[in-house]
Amino acid sequence: MQILETKRLVLREINSAIDAEFILQLLNSPGFLKYIGDRGIRDLEQSRDFIDSRLGKSYAEHGYGLYAVELKNDARDPVGICGFVKRDGLPDADLGFAFLPQFEKKGFGFESADAAMRYGRDKLGLRCILAITSLDNDNSVRLLEKLGFVFDSLIKLPRSGEDIRLFRSDV
């Protein structure tokens, strides 16, 4: 289901029937593994299960989730994900994004995240949106600051021993 579109992109719900290969590739890309973490997804069956049990569950339970970011072209190739996550240990929705390496540094992160933020506020009624980054992910920090997020604090999420940076954007 399409959620929104921008000048160059379409954001839609991720579907296990058509997106398993893309999600498998994204979750095992070097940047995802370094900055977000290893989800242990190694084959298409695990990828489909991840989509259904994590992403699909979020759409059903929260009315939002991470969305496939597609180029607005004939092939509608997915290039990344962007949207909202409801994480244990955080009181509000968390903006998340990740892109395949060949589509980084082309403005797709800002374009999709900016549109997602407007959607979150205007359609979902989110008043406070959070974002987290690893301590060494300076590119994501710059993107969050460009979107109007401000640094809040260093935190540890449940089941994680690592410090991460918490950012917030209030209406």
Image: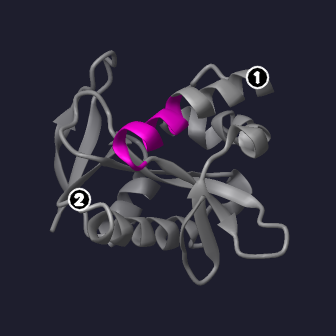
**Label 1 crowd bin: few (<14), some (14–19), many (20+), radius 10 Å:** some
**Label 2 crowd bin: few (<14), some (14–19), many (20+), radius 10 Å:** some
**Any magenta on residue 60?**
yes
Q: Which circle marks residue 126 in the picture?
A: 2
The x and y percentages for residue 98 are: 55, 50
Whether residue 151 is visible here, answered yes or no, is yes
The x and y percentages for residue 46 are: 70, 22
The x and y percentages for residue 71 are: 71, 70
**Viewer-side residue, 12 vs 90:** 12
The answer to whether 74 is drawn above or below residue 141 in the figure is: below
The x and y percentages for residue 107 are: 56, 73
Predominant SS of the magenta segment: helix
Give the residue at x 27% y 67%: 121
**Which secondary structure lies at badge 2?**
loop
What residue occupies the far bottom of the structure in this picture?
A: 7
Stretch in magenta: 54-64
